[in-house]
Amino acid sequence: MAIPNKIFDCIIIGGGQAGLSVAYFLKRSKLNYLILDAEGNSGGSWLHTWDSLKLFSPSQYSSLSGWQMPESKNEYPCRQEFIDYLKAYEKRYNFSIQRNTKVTKVKNKDGIFKIETNQGNFAETVVSATGTAKNPFIPSFPKRKDYQGVQLHSVDYRNTKKFKGKKILVIGGGNSGAQILAELSKVAQTKWVTLEEPTFLPEEIDGRYLFQQANSSYFNEKKQTEEKEVSLSDIVQVEIVKNGLKRNIYDALRPFDSFYKDGVIWQDGEKETFDAVIWCTGFNANLKHLNPLGIIKNGHIETKNTRSIKYPKLWLVGYGNWTGFASATIYGVGKTARNTAKEIKAHFDV
Ligand code: FAD
């Protein structure tokens, strides 16, 4: 049911893990908040990831503030387990949330935000937590438009069904590329292109370790210098990746020169045909709805922590390191959400 027009203390745009995390900390105040989410169901962009996706950290490191994810039967939880957890988390805390509501524009009207949706709402403060999944990134490659085969970003990849017996080029050297390549290589002929030699983390290093490192960085603890520096984009050896390593499928090639109509032209001039190219090349922040505020530069907004410098009644949560170290991860978002809620409460003096 549509909630009638009124001025909310705070509107949170986006009902994924980042939006829910802010709501969790705001709920403890008397502030009148509402989450607006474009999806019809709980789960944020996890609803649209590929079927076999496994998280790169065990359940206790894949949990949001306040309530731990139930133990998974797998070492690494699968996407459906995480979606079920988000749904249960929402129910447990009874967040105020309006679904099927896409925010198209946020405007500043005499110091109050006017939020244009199919409903129309107003708010004193706004938290934008719209993630990155709606803004997939594909790097520019010469003659990409000439290529007549299938091109798909990982955000639109579901499973191997359409690709059986085909010849596929997977582009991108992170966790998505490694996991998707591994399952495709069982049913199709595959090649892998990465900008540089990909880094596979040792078997014992997974999300747990990465998050511990994220924690130390966040609090600027010196002790992390003793630890090996690893990156959140390095490849975690979830089961399918371990199996791929055993099968020797990860022979990564450096980028080709250009596309042509049937495939790619390698740097030595040789042409190779491919039925499909799958771009596992990541995402940028989805900030389109904030365009009317005129504060987006190179895909980012100038912030102090999560707070917009130009509009101090606007916060940005969950988009990546520029909104707090590891804030685009399940474990990492809680810290920035807590701080954001604290600043919002201070604004209202509650
Ligand atoms: P989202 O989940 O994208 O939620 C944003 C919500 O906002 C969505 O519901 C969307 O529909 C809604 N929305 C967007 N625009 C609007 C609008 N204009 N109006 C209203 N609503 C809007 N992190 C980990 O910690 N562990 C992992 O194992 C892990 N695996 C990952 C695997 C993949 C393939 C990817 C892509 C990411 C992974 N991440 C992982 C990173 C991160 O946890 C996820 O990207 C996560 O979904 C980010 O949550 P979010 O709430 O910021 O964004």
Image (cartoon, rainbow, N blue to C red):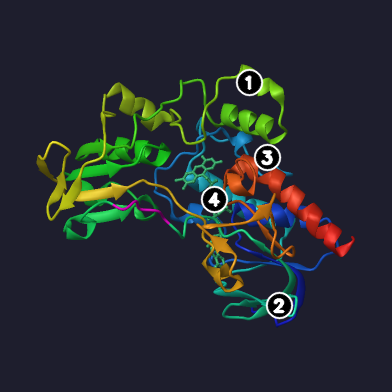
Figure check: 145 above or below 248? below
Q: CA distance from mark 1 to mark 4?
A: 35 Å
Secondary structure character of the magenta stretch overall: loop
Tell me, yes or no, whether the two marked residues, 1 and 4, touch with CB atoms within 8 Å. no
Q: Residues within 10 Å of mark 3 (few under 14, many from 20)?
A: some
> Is label 1 in a helix, a strand or a loop?
helix
Q: CA distance from mark 3 to mark 2?
A: 34 Å
Note whether ligand 1 is within 8 Å of mark 4.
Answer: no
**Quadrant holding the C terminus:** bottom right
For residue 122, the mark is 2
Boundaries of the magenta span:
136-140
Identify the residue at image location x=21%, y=38%: 190
Q: Marks 3 and 1: which is nearer the front?
A: 1
Q: Marks 2 and 4: which is nearer the front?
A: 2
Q: Position of residue 138 (x, y in %)?
A: 35, 53
Residue 230 horizontal side relative to residue 91, left or right: left
* Residue at mark 1: 225
Q: Earlier in the sequence, mark 1 or mark 4?
A: 4
Q: Is residue 69 visible?
A: no
Figure check: 139 above or below 62? below
Q: CA distance from mark 1 to mark 2?
A: 47 Å
Residue 26 horizontal side relative to residue 163, left or right: right
